[in-house]
Amino acid sequence: MKSVILAGGFGTRISEESAFKPKPMIEIGEMPILWHIMKGYYAYGINEFIICAGYKQHVIKEWFSDYFLHTSDITFDFTNGNEIIVHDKRAERWKVTVVDTGLNTMTGGRIKRIQKYVGDEPFCLTYGDAVSDVNITKLIEYHKSHGKTVTLTAVSLAQQKGILDVDDNNTITAFREKDDEDVSLINGGFMVCNPKIFDYIEGNKTVFEQEPMKRLAAEGQLKSYYHNGFWQCMDTKREKDKLEELWASGKAPWKIWED
């Protein structure tokens, strides 16, 4: 199964960093948060990624183009025709497709534009600015068990995110904006989608979290997978610093992989 990661926004709420690079390339422990997200998926056996890039998309492409070089021991032999010898390959066995989905394309439009790279099969989908210790294997198993179009990970936090109304069968009956009285379930990303999802997206101006999500909920095609473990987005400098402190402590909850 492939994992699609939305990484094309401007990141205006963390402009101290995003003025120079896309938000998913902001570093936690000297590695982009995008890398942390991918390492989490890789720990569950997913090694094929489609990155929906946009703002400063060249930064993402250049980082991956250098990744193998930066994670290996290399000899540059200028005495033998400028030969490059790789001694120790430590890069993950990833296949990464970085797609320029447009500078001003909305989240739904970005998903629509990578349809040809996904093919006619279910895929994982998440945002390029949040880390979690959600069990991806169990999430996928749950998605396959109910047969609906989308499963999203629901987390219990009082933040300014899309609010979920969930019935006793874990079916999301409404997807709406947060109001002052809401303190419970929010959309934490880490979704699994069937290819049918592309039929819910009209074009570049479609915001995935608005009409498509609301329509899925109204049709009973949106399921929740409740996660009561760690989840944290990186919308602001304060949240970035919080993640940095956790990583520096050696006890980052989202680090489920071995070094």
Image (cartoon, rainbow, N blue to C red):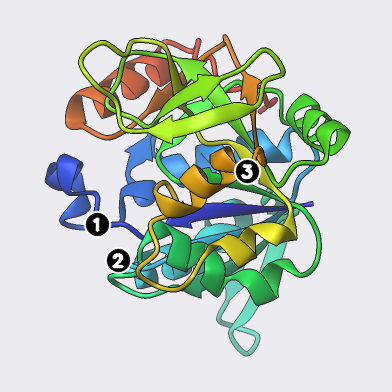
Label 2 – label 3 distance at C-alpha: 33 Å
Q: Position of residue 43 (x, y in %)?
A: 73, 33
Q: Give the residue at x 51% y 36%.
A: 189
Left or right: residue 124 versus residue 100 is right
Most foreground residue, 213 or 142: 213
First of labels 1, 3 by sequence position: 1
Q: Give the residue at x 82% y 41%.
A: 147
Left or right: residue 15 versus residue 95 is left
Per the rendering, the mark at residue 227 is none
Q: Amino acid at mark 3?
A: Glu
Q: Give the residue at x 24% y 57%.
A: 10
Question: The C terminus appears in which quarter of the rendering?
Answer: top right
Q: Residue 191: which quarter of the image? A: top right
Q: Position of residue 158 (x, y in %)?
A: 32, 13
Label 1 – label 3 distance at C-alpha: 32 Å
Q: Please name the residue that numbered disc 1 is placed on.
A: 10
How crowded pointer 1 is (Cα within 10 Å; few <14, some 14-19, many 20+) is rated as: some
Closest to the camera, between mark 1 and mark 3, is 3
Q: Please name the residue that numbered disc 2 is placed on.
A: 55
Q: Secondary structure at mark 3?
A: loop
Residue 74 visible from this viewpoint: no
Q: Secondary structure at mark 1?
A: loop
Q: Please name the residue that numbered disc 3 is placed on.
A: 219
Closest to the camera, between mark 2 and mark 3, is 3
Q: Secondary structure at mark 2?
A: loop
